[in-house]
Image (tube, helix red, strand yellow):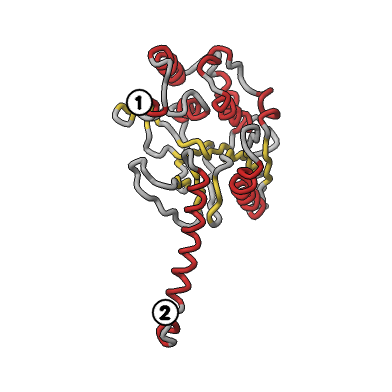
Amino acid sequence: MGAAPVKTLVAQLLDETDLTEKEVDSFWKPCMESVASWAADNGFDYKRYTFAELEPHLPDLSSIEHLLTRWQRLCISRICMFNNTAYDKIVVMDADIIIYGNPQLGDAPFGVWQEERWFPLNRFPLLPYPQCGLYYSTKGPEVYQWCCEQFSNPSKEFEYVRLTYELLAKTYPHWTRDSEARSIGVHGLCDQAIISSYIANHEFENITNHVKWKWNFTDGLGTTYPEPDSFVHFCGDKKFKSYGKWKCYLLFQKLDSFYTKNLHKLKSKRII
């Protein structure tokens, strides 16, 4: 007899409190529909969570409450999606990711894109600082418990991360985005900070088909044109511009393909 199929859940969180209906319909909904369709094509279950569903499962955040914004609480709550014993594998994915082709993930106990970023700075690389738009685990409940324990019995890595943000908040009480940008940990103490501590203590798969797509590519990384079968992540603040550029990219791909296939015919008819 063959091995039993791995029961997989693809989970996403979208809190519409601060979003308009137009924003949801024109951007978030198409992205999430592509993920739900990808999940169905691969025989995975799909669930969209609300913050109200996840909030009761948050660890006790009272010790760091003064460091958290509402958005950071939302991010941390995504780890609670791992608190589910009904599945062999749980995939947590940002709502601003669109599926390109049919990307696949490995079967490691944990996977996330390390992206060659480090905390607190690339010039001072102490801890790997992952891109947490996409991560998965085949040991979801164990990962959830480990992350929750960081707030009562922290690892050295998480204690260092927490203390770093404590000192930053004390020294720079009026942080701006410009000053934040000088640090890799620009999003503050959220799920990335917790997962950074986790992968410093556990082996993980590096999800290299998780690709960032930004409308202007001004982060010094250059333009990354994804290969088919990628998770395309619309990073940054101008997500609608990034999505528009993505649609143009797909359109020009079709035009280029048509041109290549029909070049001889177009020349014979003196169209070009």
Q: Residue furthest left?
A: 123
User: Are discs 2 and 1 less than 8 Å apart at CB?
Assistant: no
The answer to whether residue 142 is visible is no
Q: Secondary structure at mark 1?
A: strand
Q: Splitting the image into 4 quarters, where does residue 56 fall?
A: top right
Q: Residue at x 61, y 43 (%)?
A: 23
The image shows residue 213 at horizontal and vertical percentages of 45, 47
In the displayed structure, would residue 47 be above or below residue 124? below
Instruction: Tell me the residue that label 2 is attached to.
Output: 263
Q: Earlier in the sequence, mark 2 or mark 1?
A: 1
Instruction: Tell me the residue that label 1 is attached to.
Output: 126
In the displayed structure, would residue 223 be above or below residue 183? below
The answer to whether residue 176 is visible is yes
193 or 241: which is nearer to us? 241
The image shows residue 201 at horizontal and vertical percentages of 45, 26
Q: Residue furthest bottom?
A: 268
